[in-house]
Amino acid sequence: MGDYVVFHDVAWHGIYAVYFFVIGISAALFFLSALSWFREEYRPLRTPAFYGSLVLLAVAGLMLIGDLSQPARFLNVLNPAYWHMTSPLVWGTILLVAFGVVSIWYFTTLGKGDSAGKLPAMIGALLAIAIPVYTGFDLAVHQHRPVWNSSLVPVLFLGLSLISGAAVATFLARGDPRLVAALRQIMLWGSGAVAIMVISLVITTGYGGSAEELTYAFMTSGTMGMTFIGLGLLAGTLLPLLVLAVPMGRQQTGLMAAAVLILIGGISLRYSILMGPQIVQTFFS
Amino acid sequence: MSEELRLSSIETRGVQGKKRYAMVIDTRRCIGCMACQVACKAEYDTPLGVNRTWVPYKVVGTYPNVKKHFLPRLCNHCDDPPCVRACPVDATYKVDDGGFVLQRYERCIGCRACMASCPYNARFMLPSHRTYTKINNVVDKCTFCFHRVTQGLVPACVQTCIGRSRVFGDLNDPNSEVSYLVTRNATQVLRPEQGTKPQVFYIGADRNQTEYGRDLYFRPDVMEEDRAAWSRNLKI
Amino acid sequence: MIDSKISRRTFLKVSAGTTAAAAAAPRLLQAMENQLGGKDFDPVSMTERKAIPINCHVCNIQDGAIAFVENGRVVKLEGNPEHVSTRGRLCAKGNAGMWYSYDPDRILYPLKRVGTRGEGKWKRITWDEALTEVAGKLDAALKEDPNTIMLKWGRNRTGGTLERFMHTLGSATILNHTSVCESSKKVGMEPCWGPDIETPDFANTKYVLNFGSNILEAAYFHNPLSQRIAEGRVDNNMKIVTFDVRLSNTAGFSDEWIPVFPGTDGAVALAMGHVILRDNLQDSDFINTWTNVTVEELREHYKQFTPEWAEKISGVPAGTIERIAREFALTRPATLFTYRGPAKHLYGSYNEKSCMMLPIMTGNIERRGGYCLPRGMGWPQPDPKPGKPAKDSILAHPPEYPLASHKVSHLTPFFITDGRQKINVYFTYQDNAPYTNPGSMAVWGKLYKDEKLIPYLVSMSSHMGEETALADIILPDCPYLERWEPESMPNSLWPWLGIRQPVHPYLGESRENRVLLRDIIWKLDPDGSRGMKKYWDFKDGEDYMRKHFDNVPGLKEAGGLDFLKKHGVWPIYGKLDPKTGKVVDKTGREIQAEYGLHKKELSDADMAGAVVDARGLITKNGGAIGIRRNGKNYVGFSTGDRLINVRVDEWADYGFSPMPTFKRIPWHETMKEDELIMTTFKLNVHKQSRTAAVKWLAEIAHANPVWMNPQTAKKLGVKTGDLVRVESKVGYLVTKAYVTEGIHPKVVAIPTAFGHWEYGRLATLKLKEKPQFGGQDDPDLQNVWWDDKGVHPNIIIPVVADPIGGSQGWMDTVVKVAKAGPDDKYGDTQGSWDKHYEAFKETMRYAYTGDLHRKMHPEMAAWGGPESVKHKGGHGGH
């Protein structure tokens, strides 16, 4: 009746999804910028993508700090004496700090000749791959959480990072046909991979034990279902995949539309994958 | 579990020379009086809206064949606690001797990774306002009354337990009351499949309460209004 | 926290000492290795908190407790580990008791009303102004008639000062709250075996029949008896069977819950008696030796109460009655407990008597594991003592209820309105009648708002309750943690004397009650010339306690008051081992409680000059002191003939059935298909009216939807959370439905303690306002997350008075429940004075002077009518 009233909060609120989204784009933009050292078609992206990456890295960093209940203590996490290496948050800290340092190094090489930027680009690109993977581990290491505790999640977050970054890059490409074609390839194959991963997650969750079964119910119905399946999978992954696959996807407007859909899908999937699997736990009295 | 089979070096159950504190909750003796929950609030000046220990109940059956079950809950002080490995700054740690899982409030950054990792909802964020304690906006949890136990007392919830349903002691001592109860009774722990090795043992716990997710099938509806009010009004 | 005093590495050393002792102890007898209590430490600084032994007084169970003080403030309350009866444990309410003291809305200085009554406008005045005004009013009243000064308490644990105050003034108009509490239970028991309560030996029994008691949540004696129920259940493999209309925590805990139709427990109990006597399972020796009836008489009388008859009335299948009756009679030892379930009905006293007949006829009285007498302990009153008032008060002892030894206080507003007794000054103490009594504001609010009927209302209170809000003047009393009070309560088989002592000085300008009363008397009689002051000659509360305690035999040798100040409790015998909960002797060996109190033999000194009559009754100096049985002189029971009076002849004098019987509630027999019975109950974390401002308790329970069975809900088309309108013959309310399998389909139930319209900002959820009466705000109240305060049901409950016990029939209200209409809002309540007054007139018809009395008692056709007993004019003196 009204006489039992102890309730539990979700551990992480929706704002973390925005962080995942932003840091994913930042990493992917760096990756694309770095790619320009090895693939000529990406050359126009080198500077704008990097600047975009840098700005978003700053935003993500501030979000991460602002989201702590003790923001001033973010210094604790920078203190190696406190580091607890089993926590993906430490991996993230190291990766982000390294990424920031490499970004600055990379920045100093931008004006210089071709060979100067190659090394920071290479190191930065590896970090840019590792960062979305670590955000996936942020979730995946919690063994009792349905959906999260899957080896697919880090890969999925990498895929989402890449296509979200490519989608943003589409708007930085200024219609360069070779670049646009390359970005389309990334988005097309990336969305395909994301779609397969999301569908796999949905199916394995639906066929799981009681916690997974309930999570499946939460994630495929109501507002969460709308976000996850509607916006995330259908509108944000399968629809752009379709658009990109048909001739319309080779045109500028089609590409732009697909990019916008991918960004919507990127935030929706992150949000629902972050929040949906936490619901069942709040009901464990 | 024998020493050779132990998977994690952090575990101290059965390790000679170390204490492994545990609680046995005999649900046959629990009368659902809530004394433990309130005693705990007093011991720690715990703010409203959050709890270190709590006592959910479940009414099962169809009239007139109906029964009410209680399941006192608290941190399981897992022998292999996932929260410890999730904490980036070692603010959450396990006391080697005794097995207490504790929190360094002055170090906690409030990232909530430990809350995400706990399969038992034992951890919570402290709100900004408390009556007299100046520790706020960090994660808090049951400490097994470390400050009392290390000074020779039982935890506050055990102290006040009317039915003597809660019993506390050292499981590594074969002569302790908890060892006796765990040996002589069929016991259950919560979510054993998570590999956390909980150190809160239940006697006679009902599966309607221990099975994960089962609550969702029998949600008392009026409580939902309270749940909504709690989510709406409590600022944490 | 952790890094300060004890590092985690060195911890082993700290607690190594306990292991060695543990290993030496016999394995199976060993209890927890760590100490249960008596000490407490601050979790942050790890420093020890100061411990002061006290006696809990959140409710009236009177658990021994310890207050732990830090920085001048009580931060923790625990049970007193030296207390043989309550054994070092407290309930949820007891654990939260410090919030009476630190409630930000506590009244901390005298207040005088400036608006109209109940308007909520107050002026702070000095104590001197307050006392002068009160003394002036008393002076005027005394000139007219001392009995126009009335005092009504809800809870009186002063140890006699309230009575002393009234006797000093010469007024007999002293009222209590027992008729809304459990009075018919008391009146069912007292004439039968003497005391007003039983002590079931739950720890040692094998079988428990529980009729309508929710002992695991409320009732006398929640904490100490619950401890022993858990012990009996697990350590002694007892079986417990609960009869209740609702799945209380007690019913939920029990091995069997048997739902009964409200008010019919007595019929079930009689039918069980029928089975026991029919099958010859009774203890004939006990009946023939220790009661005033024979087995044959009893069997003949019980022939009428067949299980089939009871099934029709109660809905409990005859087969179940047969089975439980046999289980009860064939399992030894067995015991029984009742509380408000059977008692709070029109004929509650009959129900109680029928229930207690079961342990009597099976000879389970005063045996180990059986149904025992209470074990209390008295203390002397300081001399000189004022004499009793010259004239009795009609309100205190209404002549229509001569057997109601615990008064009929809930009828007071009607009696006053009818002009039965004039009131000039009305004192209220720890009472809250406009909230706790039937009719609520429709009755008591009406009375208090009428300045002709109640010209001057003085509230001695620490909180702005519903009643205090209507007062003319408020004298700020102290909550229990700041008072001196003597204490003893028969809350288990282990008798004790205890003390309540202040944990710190009175907060603000508040004064503890005995000091406040003294100050009134001193103001009234400053030089002692009126002969009042001499009864109030004490320096402070402690001084008064010394007068109580320094001359109690046994305690005196132990150190008197100083012993109690240090230990909080003086066990009459035995010593508690707090780890095991067993009572031990000096050598640590477990000892048994004393049993067989009635079989205590009289000494030669007692017998010197005593006379033994043909029936064995031993009298001395005109009073019965014992009973001779089988050649031995026993003290027997504390009744007139020292026997258990199965036949209560005093009842027959007034036309009531002297033998165990059952009367159906007439309006329950004529209920229509769509009508239901509304009952009320208490939850584990609340008491009647004074816990809604305790934040930790309010957090656990703050709203009170109406319970209904799914079958009922289906008929009404209602689901949990829907608004419903509950309507009785005197009013209606609109509340939320809570659909649960745990209730009888013909019953709806609403818990009390909710829906306050006064009692401070937390109880009324007006937390945006600031504390008004000098209290300090609690930052934690910013975390109050609930926004539903519930709906109080009493306004739609009409008065019913048990014509024998005088008890309110809380569980007799017939209601109609319907889905709320478009104009109904959550929390709407309405009650009409006129209709409540009609209900009062109706219930008076069942009194022995009323016209329905004879109709209800065809078996008493030979009774001579009310006129035949008028000359006795008596009132119970218990």
Image (cartoon, coloured by chain):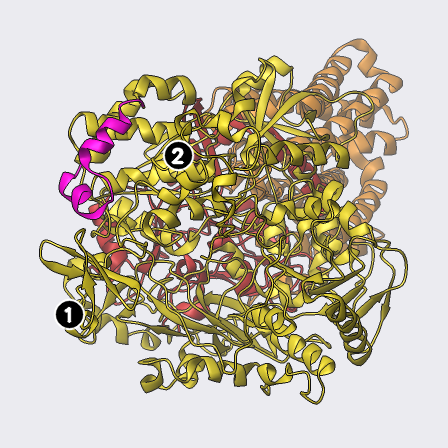
Give the residues in magenta.
Answer: C282-304
Quadrant of the drawing holding the N terminus of chain C: bottom right
Q: Where is residue A109 in the image (x, y as percent from the top left)?
A: 79, 54
- Quickly name the residue at label 2: C657
Q: Which of marks 2 and 1 is nearer the N terminus?
A: 1
Marks 2 and 1 on same chain: yes
* Letter of the chain that mark 1 sits on in the rendering: C
Q: Where is residue C298 in the image (x, y as percent from the top left)?
A: 24, 33
Q: Position of residue A4 (x, y in %)?
A: 55, 41
Quick check: A96 above or below C440?
Answer: below
| Residue in front for this viewpoint, A89 or B52 | B52
Color of chain C here?
yellow
Kindly identify the amino acid type of the residue bearing the numbered disc 1.
Ala
Residue at the spot 49% in from the left edge and 57% down from the top edge: B142
> Residue C862 sits in which quadrant?
top left
| Residue drawn at point x = 39 percent, y = 65 percent | C88
User: Of the numbered discs in the image, which one, if any, rests on residue C24?
Assistant: 1
Q: Establish if C127 lies above or below B78.
A: below
Q: In which quarter of the image is residue C634?
A: bottom left
Q: Which amino acid does label 2 sit on?
A: Ser
Report the residue that reaches farthest toward the bottom: C527
User: Which hue belongs to chain B?
Assistant: red
